[in-house]
Image (cartoon, rainbow, N blue to C red):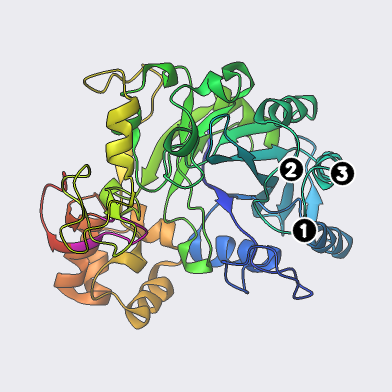
Amino acid sequence: MPTYYVDGHVHIGRSSSGQSVKISAANNLTVEGILQEAMVRKGLDIIGIIDAVSPPVQKDIRDLLAKGDLEALHGGGLRYKGKVTFFLGAEVEVAGPHGGAAHFGVFVPSVSALQELSLWLACRQTNSALSSQRLTTGTAEELATLCQELAGIFIINHAFTPHKGLYGNCVNKMNDMVSKDLVTAVELGLSADTEMADRISELADFTFVTNSDAHSLPKLAREYHVVSLTEPTFDAYKYALLRRQDQQIVMNVGLMPALGKYHRTACRKCGNRLEKPLLPCPTCGSMARVKGVWERLLEVADLQEQKSPQHRPPYIHQVPLEFIPGLGQKKREQLFRAFGTEMNILHHTTLSDLQSVVGHSLAQMIEEARTGQLMVTPGAGGRYGKITDVQLNAQI
């Protein structure tokens, strides 16, 4: 069965008319800009655009359909220029039952279903044209039920992050916020991986996915997953998340968790990483802190060690080309000219091929990066971790 590279969480910065959608995202993150980058530079086969529900983005989609650049697929989803499948989504923020808030990804199979979702959200959000808006009325349960009625996919986004993560920011148990039988899959987020998440026993039945949550074009596919499908359509992908008809996620590919911005706890005031989170910050004395994913998982985990179910695919720690020290834009362009897409560079080129383009030292660094063999200073408090050396162990 064919396999496909998927990044299922990409934001829109602006519509083609210039209207802001995700304030913190780059202006060139338009529908067409994303699909072109996925096709030409990244080598992705399937893209989930999480802000497709925004009315100005819906107009861009209709325009691309009218031009013939997008076509609706019989099995759900759209295809761009016959090469990249595009899933229509929304990221919705919902208040937690005891404080905090969480983000959920809702994907639907068709433009008509997207319009129904858009109308539902318009009555429950202050400004539904903007990305990731909070429901002013309604619950995660109601949102998930609507998604089920629309034959959609309901994903818990970046489940463990301290900002807008269900476990990281709201509850200890999924059912305290949304019924488990309404959830299709769980997105791990940049600061967690399978080994960490599989210490929570209630997640054993769920498929995990890794996605970029990209806010700029270069961040596409900083995390992604590989899926085995009969065809690259919405229905087939949904079956893979539910592990039906022999379709399944075969690999999650993500950053080493320590590279994530919220892997460890940090002082909220000065940003200093805190080795002992219960004590005042040794730098500024503040007790305010941003709790790291690692520390939060220790609180909610009910297993002493990882216990992965048989269906769990391998998680490959991999560092995108953009993160590699010394591999600047000029060198990356040389690699793209020689080997095409980033997926090809990371998965299919040999070490000797790389050496012929960028030399021994950088080629060796890429080899270590694509197999997760780099020493990392962990990220915390909204700052990414940093690659510090080439090592064979990146355990934090």
Q: Is residue 99 above or below residue 305?
A: below
Q: Which residue, given by chain and number where applicable, does mark 3 sit on?
A: 119
Q: Earlier in the sequence, mark 2 or mark 3?
A: 3
Would residue 358 appear left or right of 83 to someone viewing this image?
A: left
Q: Which residue, given by chain and number where applicable, does mark 1 sit on?
A: 129
Q: Position of residue 56 (x, y in %)?
A: 81, 63
Is 219 in front, or is 75?
219
Instruction: Name the residue located 20 percent from the left edge and 51 percent from the top edge.
Output: 280
Q: Position of residue 115 (x, y in %)?
A: 86, 45
Q: Is residue 80 above or below residue 20?
A: above
Mark 2 or 1: the one toward you: 2
Amino acid bearing label 1: Ala
Which of the labelled discs sits on residue 204, or is there none? none
Instruction: Name the residue located 33 percent from the left edge and 41 percent from the top edge.
Output: 293
Q: Is residue 113 above or below residue 259?
A: above
Amino acid bearing label 2: Thr
Would residue 139 appear left or right of 390 to someone viewing this image?
A: right
Q: Looking at the image, do the residues carrying marks 2 and 1 touch, with CB atoms under 8 Å apart?
A: no
Q: Position of residue 28 (x, y in %)?
A: 62, 73
Which segment is the magenta one? 379-387
Quarter of the image holding residue 286?
A: bottom left
Q: Give the secondary structure at mark 2.
A: loop
Q: Earlier in the sequence, mark 1 or mark 3?
A: 3
Q: In 3D space, how far apart are the residues under numbered discs 2 and 1 (Cα atoms)? A: 15 Å
Quarter of the image holding residue 384?
A: bottom left
- For label 1, the crowd category at 10 Å Cα-Cα, with few meaning under 14, some 14 to 19 and many 20 or more, is many
Question: In terms of secondary structure, what is the magenta stretch mainly?
Answer: loop
Would residue 141 appear left or right of 150 to someone viewing this image?
A: left
Is 366 in front, or is 109?
109
Instruction: Name the residue located 73 percent from the left edge and 53 percent from the top edge.
Output: 52
Say if the magenta span includes residue 386.
yes
